[in-house]
Amino acid sequence: MKKILFSAHNLDLGGIETALVTLVNHLSEKEYDITLALEKKEGVFLDRLSKKIQVVEYNTSNNKNIFIRKLHNIGNRVRFILKYKNKFDFSASFATYSLASSFMARTASKNSALWCHADYLTLYQGNKEEVEAFFKNVHCGEFHHIVFVSKEGTNSFIKIFPELKDKVITCNNLIDGERILQKSKEPMIEKDVQELSKKNIPIFLNVGRHDERQKRLTRVIEACKQLKQEDYQFKVLFIGDGPDTKVYQEKVVEYHLEETILFLGRKENPYPYFTISDCIILSSEYEGYPVVYLESFILDKPIITTKVSDYKQVEEGRGIVVEKNTQAIYSAMKEFLQNGYHITNHFDYEKYNANILKTLETMI
């Protein structure tokens, strides 16, 4: 049985954490011996891990006293090296940004991989020097494989690090389609939201972190303002929270959209809300590989999306792809309200996962 170590920061609610839990659970069923090494053994997804997976805590110190912090972290490194150095057949740092995660993966196996979840050239607004500094900081060149979850991320990286081209692999995230379908049947907490599905009013849904720099939810809010001025009747559900939630809420009040846009907060299970929605909206400036694409495909919901990573999968009969601006979002929502959208390309998640597993097994 091959021994595998995955390292990450924690298992709090998020797209990267969702992808990690899905991946390690799936591999644990394939007769791999999985160890998950976390900087902090915390997060809502801990309970979703298979009992077959061993979880260890690295416990990085953030003590304000520099001497105490360095002493603690040096001791951590030494203990990890003594216990785990080259003890695994394969290892992967799943938290791209994390120095501790990078260290653990590079130490645990010579066959190590760095998982990358974004198009970093877009993330750093085209600043090649910042992208280069980011990857050098996590010692990307010392990994045996560098894995990107989207083609756009792969291509951007190779532009900056052409000498590492042979190490780079594109591998989308696995998706637990069966679980998503099962969870979508669970009841929602909010009775008033449940009642919405019984009314003949179109419902749009956005799921994600409220971070304007990336998600640009002001595009959706501004589009809603225009549509309401034209007397269109609809609802928008925002699931998630983040640093800009209050900004969004204030703008909704300013535009008198309190009855149109509903803030439902974070949901460990967002899938029942997909079920009652008619269309999903992604207004982001950039994404790695949007997990919401796969969730929409599996639950057979059309999606309006800006041109982020792998948007061509939506163009193939699964939704409407638009430019990254408010007017484009407005036009797409208006088009949907007037004409709806008929999905012509239904998604086979089992075939999708099988192709990914071939890539993973080759690496391992």
Image (spheres, rainbow, N blue to C red):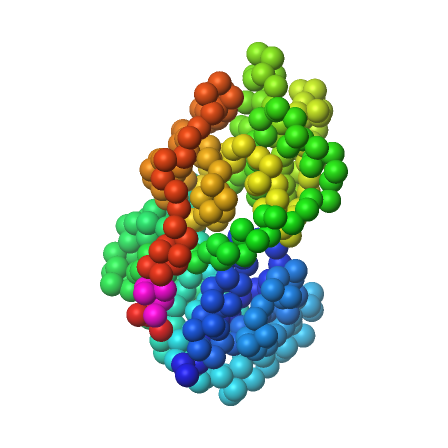
Residue 14 higher or lower than 282, as above or below: below
Q: Nearer the viewer, residue 215 or 278?
A: 278
- Magenta span has 357? yes
Residue 36, given in percent of the width and then of the height, sits at 53, 73
Residue 174, given in percent of the width and then of the height, sits at 43, 58
Residue at image coords 47%, 64%: 23
The magenta span reads: 356-361
Asked whether residue 126 appears in the rendered view, the answer is: no
Quarter holding the C terminus is bottom left
Residue 228, given in percent of the width and then of the height, sits at 61, 16
Q: Residue farthest to the top?
A: 230
Residue at image coords 73%, 44%: 189
- Magenta span has 346? no
Residue 128, given in percent of the width and then of the height, sits at 36, 48
Residue 149 higher or lower than 83, as above or below: above
Residue at image coords 70%, 35%: 193
Residue at image coords 48%, 73%: 28
- The total of numbered circles placed on residues is 0
Asked whether residue 110 appears in the rendered view, the answer is: yes
Q: Nearer the viewer, residue 232 or 122?
A: 232
Q: Nearer the viewer, residue 158 or 291?
A: 291
